Amino acid sequence: MRRLEAMLEEAINDSFEEEHYDESRLSRLEAKWKHFLSSSVSSRHRLMEEQDKIKMLISDISHQTKTPIANILLYSQILQEKETDPELLPIVENIREQSEKLDFLIRSMVKASRLESDILVLQTKKQPVMPCILAAAADVQEAALKKQIEITVKETEADACFDRKWTEEAVGNLIDNAVKYSPAGSQVQVSVTDYQMFAAVQVADCGIGIREEEQAQVFERFYRSREVAGEKGVGIGLYLVREIATRQGGYVKVKSKHGEGSIFYFYMAK
Protein backbone atom coordinates (compact mmCIF):
# COMPACT_ATOMS: atom_id res chain seq x y z
CA MET A 1 0.00 0.00 0.00
CA ARG A 2 2.89 2.35 0.78
CA ARG A 3 4.40 1.61 -2.66
CA LEU A 4 1.07 2.31 -4.39
CA GLU A 5 0.59 5.48 -2.36
CA ALA A 6 4.09 6.69 -3.29
CA MET A 7 3.38 6.08 -6.99
CA LEU A 8 0.13 8.02 -6.78
CA GLU A 9 1.75 10.89 -4.89
CA GLU A 10 4.44 11.21 -7.56
CA ALA A 11 1.79 11.19 -10.31
CA ILE A 12 -0.14 13.97 -8.55
CA ASN A 13 3.07 16.01 -8.26
CA ASP A 14 3.89 15.31 -11.91
CA SER A 15 7.18 13.66 -10.91
CA PHE A 16 6.29 10.02 -11.62
CA GLU A 17 8.82 8.20 -13.80
CA GLU A 18 8.48 4.57 -14.73
CA GLU A 19 12.14 3.73 -14.30
CA HIS A 20 11.94 4.45 -10.58
CA TYR A 21 10.50 0.97 -10.06
CA ASP A 22 11.98 -2.45 -10.77
CA GLU A 23 9.27 -4.43 -12.55
CA SER A 24 10.78 -7.75 -11.46
CA ARG A 25 10.00 -6.93 -7.83
CA LEU A 26 6.49 -5.59 -8.37
CA SER A 27 3.31 -7.52 -7.83
CA ARG A 28 0.78 -7.81 -10.63
CA LEU A 29 -1.27 -5.01 -9.08
CA GLU A 30 1.75 -2.73 -8.84
CA ALA A 31 2.61 -3.40 -12.48
CA LYS A 32 -0.93 -2.49 -13.60
CA TRP A 33 -0.91 0.57 -11.38
CA LYS A 34 2.43 1.66 -12.82
CA HIS A 35 1.13 1.20 -16.38
CA PHE A 36 -1.97 3.25 -15.63
CA LEU A 37 0.02 6.09 -14.07
CA SER A 38 2.51 6.13 -16.95
CA SER A 39 -0.36 6.42 -19.42
CA SER A 40 -1.97 9.20 -17.36
CA VAL A 41 1.27 11.18 -17.18
CA SER A 42 1.80 10.79 -20.94
CA SER A 43 -1.78 11.93 -21.60
CA ARG A 44 -1.31 14.96 -19.37
CA HIS A 45 1.89 15.92 -21.16
CA ARG A 46 0.23 15.54 -24.56
CA LEU A 47 -2.69 17.68 -23.37
CA MET A 48 -0.29 20.39 -22.17
CA GLU A 49 1.49 20.31 -25.52
CA GLU A 50 -1.82 20.64 -27.38
CA GLN A 51 -2.82 23.59 -25.16
CA ASP A 52 0.49 25.28 -25.93
CA LYS A 53 -0.14 24.80 -29.66
CA ILE A 54 -3.66 26.23 -29.34
CA LYS A 55 -2.32 29.16 -27.35
CA MET A 56 0.24 29.92 -30.07
CA LEU A 57 -2.39 29.55 -32.80
CA ILE A 58 -4.79 31.94 -31.06
CA SER A 59 -1.99 34.43 -30.51
CA ASP A 60 -0.95 34.20 -34.18
CA ILE A 61 -4.52 34.68 -35.44
CA SER A 62 -5.01 37.70 -33.20
CA HIS A 63 -1.68 39.25 -34.17
CA GLN A 64 -1.67 38.50 -37.91
CA THR A 65 -5.23 39.71 -38.57
CA LYS A 66 -5.09 42.90 -36.52
CA THR A 67 -3.13 45.02 -39.00
CA PRO A 68 -4.92 43.94 -42.22
CA ILE A 69 -8.35 44.54 -40.74
CA ALA A 70 -7.29 47.91 -39.32
CA ASN A 71 -6.03 48.89 -42.78
CA ILE A 72 -9.26 47.80 -44.47
CA LEU A 73 -11.28 49.86 -41.98
CA LEU A 74 -9.02 52.86 -42.52
CA TYR A 75 -9.22 52.66 -46.33
CA SER A 76 -13.01 52.23 -46.25
CA GLN A 77 -13.31 55.37 -44.11
CA ILE A 78 -11.13 57.29 -46.57
CA LEU A 79 -13.27 56.05 -49.46
CA GLN A 80 -16.42 57.16 -47.66
CA GLU A 81 -14.99 60.66 -47.26
CA LYS A 82 -13.78 60.97 -50.86
CA GLU A 83 -16.36 59.01 -52.85
CA THR A 84 -19.13 61.15 -54.34
CA ASP A 85 -20.79 58.68 -56.69
CA PRO A 86 -24.20 57.88 -55.10
CA GLU A 87 -24.15 54.40 -56.64
CA LEU A 88 -20.81 53.51 -55.04
CA LEU A 89 -21.47 54.95 -51.58
CA PRO A 90 -23.67 52.01 -50.43
CA ILE A 91 -20.95 49.57 -51.56
CA VAL A 92 -18.26 51.43 -49.60
CA GLU A 93 -20.53 51.51 -46.54
CA ASN A 94 -21.11 47.78 -46.86
CA ILE A 95 -17.34 47.17 -47.01
CA ARG A 96 -16.89 49.17 -43.82
CA GLU A 97 -19.72 47.37 -42.00
CA GLN A 98 -18.49 43.92 -43.02
CA SER A 99 -14.93 44.80 -41.99
CA GLU A 100 -16.16 45.91 -38.57
CA LYS A 101 -18.16 42.68 -38.28
CA LEU A 102 -15.10 40.60 -39.18
CA ASP A 103 -12.97 42.49 -36.66
CA PHE A 104 -15.56 41.94 -33.92
CA LEU A 105 -15.94 38.26 -34.84
CA ILE A 106 -12.21 37.53 -34.68
CA ARG A 107 -11.80 39.35 -31.36
CA SER A 108 -14.80 37.49 -29.90
CA MET A 109 -13.57 34.12 -31.17
CA VAL A 110 -10.14 34.72 -29.67
CA LYS A 111 -11.72 35.55 -26.30
CA ALA A 112 -13.99 32.48 -26.42
CA SER A 113 -11.11 30.18 -27.40
CA ARG A 114 -8.96 31.45 -24.56
CA LEU A 115 -11.72 30.73 -22.08
CA GLU A 116 -12.65 27.32 -23.51
CA SER A 117 -9.09 26.01 -23.68
CA ASP A 118 -8.28 27.20 -20.13
CA ILE A 119 -5.45 29.28 -21.56
CA LEU A 120 -6.85 32.25 -19.71
CA VAL A 121 -7.59 31.84 -16.00
CA LEU A 122 -9.96 34.36 -14.46
CA GLN A 123 -8.43 36.08 -11.44
CA THR A 124 -11.30 36.55 -9.01
CA LYS A 125 -11.16 38.58 -5.84
CA LYS A 126 -13.70 40.18 -3.54
CA GLN A 127 -14.34 43.77 -4.61
CA PRO A 128 -17.12 46.35 -5.02
CA VAL A 129 -19.49 45.74 -7.94
CA MET A 130 -20.35 49.38 -8.67
CA PRO A 131 -17.10 50.53 -10.39
CA CYS A 132 -17.27 47.57 -12.77
CA ILE A 133 -20.86 48.33 -13.76
CA LEU A 134 -20.17 52.04 -14.28
CA ALA A 135 -17.19 51.25 -16.53
CA ALA A 136 -19.24 48.78 -18.57
CA ALA A 137 -22.07 51.28 -19.00
CA ALA A 138 -19.62 54.04 -20.04
CA ASP A 139 -18.31 51.87 -22.88
CA VAL A 140 -21.81 51.63 -24.36
CA GLN A 141 -22.75 55.26 -23.79
CA GLU A 142 -21.86 56.44 -27.30
CA ALA A 143 -24.09 53.81 -28.95
CA ALA A 144 -26.90 54.71 -26.54
CA LEU A 145 -26.66 58.42 -27.36
CA LYS A 146 -27.00 57.70 -31.08
CA LYS A 147 -30.37 56.06 -30.36
CA GLN A 148 -31.31 58.58 -27.64
CA ILE A 149 -31.47 55.74 -25.13
CA GLU A 150 -30.88 56.59 -21.48
CA ILE A 151 -28.79 54.13 -19.45
CA THR A 152 -29.57 54.43 -15.74
CA VAL A 153 -27.34 52.70 -13.17
CA LYS A 154 -28.74 52.28 -9.68
CA GLU A 155 -26.23 52.80 -6.86
CA THR A 156 -25.18 49.73 -4.89
CA GLU A 157 -22.71 48.88 -2.13
CA ALA A 158 -22.66 45.17 -2.97
CA ASP A 159 -19.40 43.22 -3.04
CA ALA A 160 -18.68 39.98 -4.90
CA CYS A 161 -15.82 37.73 -6.02
CA PHE A 162 -15.12 38.35 -9.69
CA ASP A 163 -12.49 39.11 -12.29
CA ARG A 164 -12.83 42.86 -12.99
CA LYS A 165 -11.72 42.82 -16.65
CA TRP A 166 -13.83 39.87 -17.78
CA THR A 167 -16.88 40.79 -15.70
CA GLU A 168 -16.79 44.26 -17.24
CA GLU A 169 -16.73 42.53 -20.63
CA ALA A 170 -19.76 40.37 -19.71
CA VAL A 171 -21.86 43.19 -18.23
CA GLY A 172 -20.86 45.41 -21.17
CA ASN A 173 -22.18 42.78 -23.58
CA LEU A 174 -25.52 42.68 -21.73
CA ILE A 175 -25.87 46.47 -21.77
CA ASP A 176 -24.78 46.66 -25.42
CA ASN A 177 -27.43 44.08 -26.38
CA ALA A 178 -30.06 45.99 -24.41
CA VAL A 179 -29.23 49.18 -26.32
CA LYS A 180 -29.02 47.39 -29.66
CA TYR A 181 -32.44 45.72 -29.40
CA SER A 182 -34.34 48.57 -27.71
CA PRO A 183 -36.30 51.23 -29.60
CA ALA A 184 -34.91 54.74 -29.92
CA GLY A 185 -35.83 57.03 -27.05
CA SER A 186 -36.32 54.22 -24.54
CA GLN A 187 -34.42 53.37 -21.37
CA VAL A 188 -32.02 50.65 -20.19
CA GLN A 189 -31.89 50.09 -16.43
CA VAL A 190 -28.92 48.49 -14.65
CA SER A 191 -29.20 47.49 -11.00
CA VAL A 192 -27.80 44.99 -8.49
CA THR A 193 -29.62 42.72 -6.07
CA ASP A 194 -27.43 41.79 -3.10
CA TYR A 195 -28.24 38.26 -1.90
CA GLN A 196 -26.54 36.31 0.89
CA MET A 197 -24.51 34.09 -1.45
CA PHE A 198 -24.63 36.04 -4.72
CA ALA A 199 -24.72 39.53 -6.15
CA ALA A 200 -26.90 39.70 -9.27
CA VAL A 201 -26.42 42.40 -11.89
CA GLN A 202 -29.72 43.03 -13.67
CA VAL A 203 -29.95 44.64 -17.09
CA ALA A 204 -33.52 45.52 -18.11
CA ASP A 205 -34.52 46.84 -21.52
CA CYS A 206 -37.66 47.85 -23.43
CA GLY A 207 -36.80 45.82 -26.51
CA ILE A 208 -38.55 43.19 -28.58
CA GLY A 209 -38.21 40.51 -25.93
CA ILE A 210 -37.38 36.83 -26.42
CA ARG A 211 -39.86 34.06 -27.14
CA GLU A 212 -40.03 31.42 -24.40
CA GLU A 213 -38.82 28.62 -26.68
CA GLU A 214 -35.70 30.65 -27.56
CA GLN A 215 -34.66 31.70 -24.07
CA ALA A 216 -32.46 28.65 -23.48
CA GLN A 217 -30.85 29.00 -26.92
CA VAL A 218 -29.74 32.63 -26.75
CA PHE A 219 -26.67 31.66 -24.69
CA GLU A 220 -25.46 29.17 -27.29
CA ARG A 221 -22.55 30.05 -29.54
CA PHE A 222 -23.60 31.78 -32.81
CA TYR A 223 -27.32 31.52 -32.06
CA ARG A 224 -29.32 34.45 -33.44
CA SER A 225 -33.07 34.76 -33.60
CA ARG A 226 -34.55 35.35 -37.03
CA GLU A 227 -36.25 38.45 -35.62
CA VAL A 228 -32.88 40.21 -35.11
CA ALA A 229 -31.23 39.06 -38.34
CA GLY A 230 -31.15 42.65 -39.56
CA GLU A 231 -29.20 43.90 -36.54
CA LYS A 232 -25.42 43.89 -36.27
CA GLY A 233 -23.96 40.97 -34.36
CA VAL A 234 -22.48 37.49 -34.70
CA GLY A 235 -24.27 35.63 -31.90
CA ILE A 236 -21.33 35.15 -29.56
CA GLY A 237 -21.81 37.92 -26.97
CA LEU A 238 -24.24 36.06 -24.71
CA TYR A 239 -22.19 32.89 -25.07
CA LEU A 240 -19.20 34.79 -23.66
CA VAL A 241 -21.38 36.17 -20.86
CA ARG A 242 -22.35 32.64 -19.82
CA GLU A 243 -18.76 31.34 -20.01
CA ILE A 244 -17.43 34.21 -17.90
CA ALA A 245 -20.16 33.79 -15.27
CA THR A 246 -19.67 30.02 -15.05
CA ARG A 247 -15.88 30.17 -14.79
CA GLN A 248 -16.01 32.43 -11.76
CA GLY A 249 -18.63 30.44 -9.88
CA GLY A 250 -21.76 32.26 -11.05
CA TYR A 251 -24.45 31.84 -13.67
CA VAL A 252 -26.77 33.80 -15.97
CA LYS A 253 -30.48 33.70 -16.69
CA VAL A 254 -33.04 35.71 -18.59
CA LYS A 255 -36.62 36.72 -17.89
CA SER A 256 -38.47 37.92 -20.94
CA LYS A 257 -41.82 38.14 -22.65
CA HIS A 258 -42.03 38.60 -26.39
CA GLY A 259 -42.81 42.21 -27.23
CA GLU A 260 -42.32 43.43 -23.66
CA GLY A 261 -38.56 43.62 -23.16
CA SER A 262 -36.06 41.45 -21.29
CA ILE A 263 -34.17 41.31 -18.00
CA PHE A 264 -30.80 39.55 -17.96
CA TYR A 265 -29.34 38.45 -14.62
CA PHE A 266 -25.58 38.01 -14.14
CA TYR A 267 -24.86 36.24 -10.84
CA MET A 268 -21.51 36.52 -9.06
CA ALA A 269 -20.56 34.52 -5.98
CA LYS A 270 -19.92 36.42 -2.76
Image (cartoon, rainbow, N blue to C red):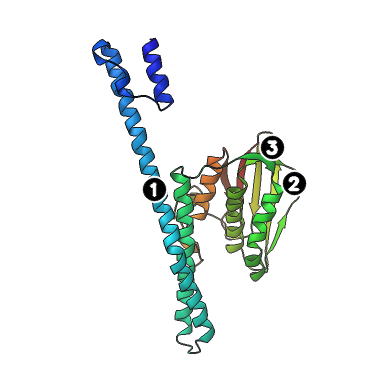
Disc 2 versus disc 1: distance between alpha carbons? Answer: 40 Å
Tell me which numbered mark, 2 or 3, is placed earlier along the sequence. Answer: 2
> Which amino acid does the dot numbered 1 rest on?
Ile
Answer with the quarter of the image where residue 145 lies. bottom right
Question: Which label lies toward us, 2 or 3?
Answer: 2
Q: Residue at x 69, y 37 (%)?
A: 195
* x and y, in percent, of residue 230 in the image: 49, 67
Pick out the residue farthest to the left. 24
Against 70, residue 57 (above or below) is: above
The residue tagged with tag 2: helix, strand or loop? loop
What is the quadrant of the C terminus in the image?
top right
Against 220, residue 146 (above or below) is: below
Q: Is residue 22 visible?
A: yes
Judging by the rendered image, the residue that carries numbered circle 2 is 156
* x and y, in percent, of residue 268 in the image: 62, 41
Judging by the rendered image, the residue that carries numbered circle 3 is 195
Q: Residue at x 48, y 83 (%)?
A: 89
- Disc 2: CA contacts within 10 A as few (<14), some (14-19) or many (>=20): some
> Which amino acid does the dot numbered 3 rest on?
Tyr
> Which amino acid does the dot numbered 2 rest on?
Thr
Question: Which label lies toward us, 1 or 3?
Answer: 1
Q: Tell me: 253 left or right of 64.
A: right
- Disc 3: CA contacts within 10 A as few (<14), some (14-19) or many (>=20): few
Answer with the quarter of the image where residue 9 lies. top left
